[in-house]
Image (tube, rainbow, N blue to C red):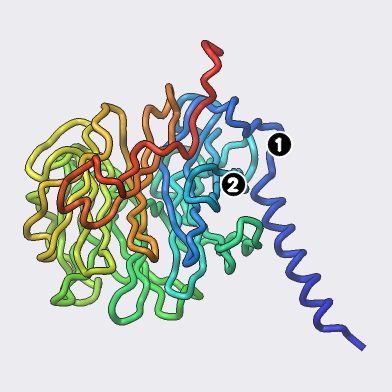
Amino acid sequence: MIDFKKRKLFITILISAIFVLYALKTSGQDHSLESRKFQGIPSLAISSKGQLWATWYAGITPGEDQNNYVVVATSGNDGKTWTEINIIDPDGDGPIRAFDPELWMDPMGRLWSFWAQSIGHDGTIAGVWASTNNNPDKEKSNWSPPRRITDGIMMCKPTVLSSGEWMLPASTWRDTDNSARVVVSTDKGQNFNIRGACNVPREVRSYDEHMIVERQDLSLWMLLRTSYGIGESISKDRGETWSTLAPSSIRHPSARFFIRRLRSGNLLLVKHGQISEKTDRSHLTAFLSKDDGRTWSDGLLLDERSGVSYPDGQQGQDGTIYIIYDYSRTDAREILMATFTEDDVVEGNPDSSSVSLRIVVSKYPDKGNQE
């Protein structure tokens, strides 16, 4: 007689082992922190009980190439210490690179780890891959086998629409028209299909890195990275068609920013410089909008240094906002975090007792001149 409980346990262990073998396949590549000449482009997510998860990508050369791999780390003490638990490196030091990761908590409490895979630095032939964790409250928990979701690269968080649909912002930013795609699941992540896309003219295209906000009137507001800063497009038919891309009134360098709706219904925006100011990759600042992005608060300065970039984050159950970003990808090689509240953003006071800045998630060991 078949013992179904033992069979289920065996299958669970086997699936976990398959993922570990996949994720930790090294083919001789050293994934230690000391070996890294590059790390950056992070993402962050928080479980319902406050377990923090972070991801970024790294490499043994100071750049973006076939040596790149994805790191997944976690913290159970609010970011005081972090443990790297997964290395996603499909073929070790081979031609396939893993890069541009994103973490996201879905409405059912599952943690999704997304990343891109391709041969070379090409967003056209890249694929978005994902693995899920059904128990993200614990550091030691099982991940599903990786699966390919769609073509392209997705390095910004999905949006859950009021209809319950999940909308993923995946981009094929090299040689295709309609590169800023929206890929939708109507069955809680079992299947994903392209619904529509915004056409980003090739002369202003710069990786897209688009984000989607559902406004109070149910229209969808897409903000995306262009060569001139931030472009915007609107959809009034749930993402099937999008208006002609136009420059946003939000000034910015050609770099990723972060926008998300908070539990209060207000919008959080993290960008470089003031709303009407185009700076370099410095002065990372958080803003709040109470009117769906028409106006913004004065801002809370998170990090003024040149070389900070790529904010991402999430609001916790207690209202605390966690923002992760990188600093000096090939020198200091730091992954940093800032925590604050919605009131802190409104008041713009970095000295508030609820504000913590430059929390270290990961950094290259400072042991003198090693190179």
Instruction: Determine if residue 311 is in view.
Output: yes
Instruction: Determine if residue 199 is in view.
Output: no
Task: List x then y, in percent, for residue 18.
Answer: 72, 58
Quadrant of the rendered image containing residue 202: top left
Left or right placement of residue 149 versus residue 178 in this view:
right
Question: Residue drawn 59% across and 59% down?
Answer: 146
Amino acid type of disc 1? Ser
Q: Nearer the viewer, residue 106 or 359?
A: 359
Q: Give residue 27's mark.
A: 1
Q: Is residue 28 above or below residue 340?
A: above
Amino acid type of disc 2? Ile
Q: Is residue 248 above or below residue 329?
A: below
Task: List x then y, in percent, for residue 40.
Answer: 43, 36
Assign the C terminus to one quadrant of the image: top right
Labels 1, 2: front one: 2
Quadrant of the rendered image containing residue 211: bottom left
Left or right placement of residue 227 versus residue 322 in this view:
left
Q: Which residue is mark 2?
A: 88
Q: Nearer the viewer, residue 56 or 201?
A: 56
Query: Secondary structure beneath disc 1?
Result: loop
Q: Is residue 240 above or below residue 333?
A: below
Q: Name the residue furthest front.
A: 353
Between the C-alphas of marks 1 and 2, the distance is 13 Å
Question: Residue drawn 31% across and 49% down?
Answer: 354
